[in-house]
Amino acid sequence: MAGVTFSQALFDRICERMAEGESLRVICKSKDMPNKRTVMRWVAADEKLAEQYSEAQSMRADCYFDQIIDIADSKADPQKTRVQIDARKWVLARMNPKKYGDKFTQELTGSEGGALIVKIVREGEDDA
């Protein structure tokens, strides 16, 4: 919808729909909604709106997480199910990597699995 004037009620509706799993792109295709660029300008210009938008995105990620379980439990075609789940997992890992991303750990051990020995050599000291 061209020339939409900001209102908190409108922005609240956008965030509610996002929290229920809709993307901003889909929301903005509705004829009663502003375009995506307008919404992003509102978010960039107001810290409170940015916080509200961020919370809606977080809730959207949680919605995607719930959808993964629903899709896995469905009786749909297994190949289609795998693609749907993998797509959501990929998006989740980028939307909120701390919560949904892969966790990597690294373990350092010395020779034959023993303790790691660290030797600090200062410049000018013998290495012996």
Image (cartoon, rainbow, N blue to C red):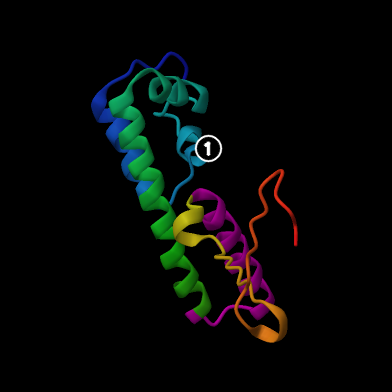
Q: Residue at x 60, y 78 (%)?
A: 115
Q: Depth check: give the residue in front, 54 or 23.
A: 54
Which quadrant holds residue 83?
Answer: bottom right
| Percent x, y of residue 58 | 39, 49
Mark 1 Cα-neighbour bin, 10 Å: few <14, some 14–19, many ≥20: few
Residue 108 painted magenta:
no
Name the residue tied to disc 1: 25
**Quadrant of image for the C terminus:** bottom right
The residue at the far bottom in this view is 112
Q: Depth check: give the residue in front, 116 or 98.
A: 116
Q: Residue at x 64, y 78 (%)?
A: 77
Task: Judge left or right: residue 126 versus residue 21.
Answer: right
Q: Residue at x 47, y 52 (%)?
A: 96
The residue at the far left in this view is 9
Is disc 1 placed on a helix, strand or loop?
helix
| Percent x, y of residue 4 | 39, 17
Q: What is the count of numbered marks? A: 1
Chain part drawn in magenta: 73-95
- The secondary structure that dominates the magenta segment is helix
Residue 1, above or below 108: above
Q: Depth check: give the residue in front, 2 or 115.
A: 115
Residue 81 painted magenta:
yes
Residue 124, above or below 114: above
| Amino acid at the residue labelled 1 | Arg
